[in-house]
Image: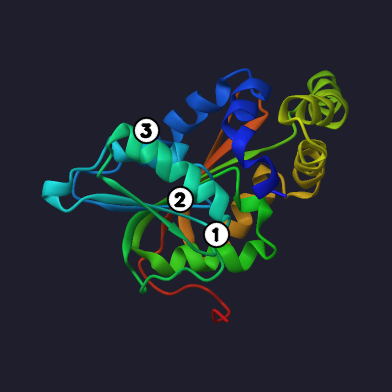
Amino acid sequence: MFSGISRRYDFLNHLLSLNRDRSWRRRAARELAPAGNELILDACTGTADLALELSGYVDTDSGGHVIGTDFCAEMVCLGEQKRLKKKEDRCTLLLADTLNLPFADETFDGATVAFGIRNLCDLEAGLLELRRVLKPGGRIALLEFTPPRGAILRSLFALYFLRILPWLGRIFSRSSKGAEAYSYLPASVKEFPGPQELEELIRKAGFDSVRHHRMTAGIVALHLGCRTETEQVSHARR
């Protein structure tokens, strides 16, 4: 599904969010605030927009670097084209599954996921895997859509997501895959835990200082937290 819309993915993201997706990613990078010498993971990186945004914070001469990973080869290839066009050597993109990351324990100082965490077939396992590759005290920033508060906003959100967005996705992606992907988006958001429930899942996965900020009339939430210094997860990673 994602490979089928990869060529129009960036255009559709900017169009269907009224270009707000750029500011959401900038906010996530700013809140994570990587230091120049830190190693940062951007999981479910897609076409690497957030990974490239994060790259502006690190310094290779100081040992800093950003690694973006995604399971979709077509998305990673498009991200690599963008990286090369920008001549960005502070970022590396890899093909990898977020549920089974190819990194040693306690590798990264920070980890981000922008609009990809809800696509994992096992959310709790994904959170545990992100925790595993973070150093104690390492930070996490998760961007995700969420239904807004208030009956009127919620109704408008549902109208746009359930009716208008799939239609626009089909037209502008120029394929039935666009309608499929942008019908999946509202369905997956509807089934995904709300901000408070997601906060609790993040805590259970071994993070503290967990909080979230809503943006753009509450349709997007940025979740932040830090990996606990000691092992607090009740069940072992499988």
Classify the position of the C terminus by image quarter.
bottom right
Question: In the figure, is residue 207 to the left or right of 162?
Answer: left
Q: Which mark is residue 203?
A: 1
- Could you tell me if residue 33 is visible in this image? no
Would residue 51 be found to the left or right of residue 118 on screen? left
Dot 2 falls on a residue whose secondary structure is: strand
Mark 2 neighbour class, 10 Å CA radius: few under 14, some 14 to 19, many 20 or more: many
Residue 13: x and y in percent read 62, 29
At numbered mark 1, what does the secondary structure look like: helix, strand or loop? helix
CA gap, disc 3 and disc 2: 14 Å
Q: Is residue 107 visible?
A: yes
* Residue at x-position 79% and y-position 44%: 184
Q: Nearer the viewer, mark 3 or mark 1?
A: 3
Q: Earlier in the sequence, mark 3 or mark 1?
A: 3
The residue lying toward the viewer, choosing from 217 and 71, is 71
Q: CA distance from mark 1 to mark 2?
A: 8 Å
Residue 211 is marked as none
Q: Earlier in the sequence, mark 3 or mark 2?
A: 3
Please name the residue that numbered disc 2 is placed on: 225
Q: Which residue is mark 3?
A: 30
Q: Is residue 140 above or below residue 101?
A: above
Q: Earlier in the sequence, mark 1 or mark 2?
A: 1
Is there CB contact under 8 Å for labels 1 and 2? yes
User: What residue is rendered at 31% in x and 40% in y?
Assistant: 55
Q: Residues within 10 Å of mark 3 (few under 14, many from 20)?
A: few
Q: Residue 211 placed where, x, y %?
A: 52, 43
Instruction: Give yes or no for contact between labels 3 and 2 (Cβ–Cβ under 8 Å).
Output: no
Type of the residue with mark 3: Arg
Amino acid on which disc 2 is placed: Gly
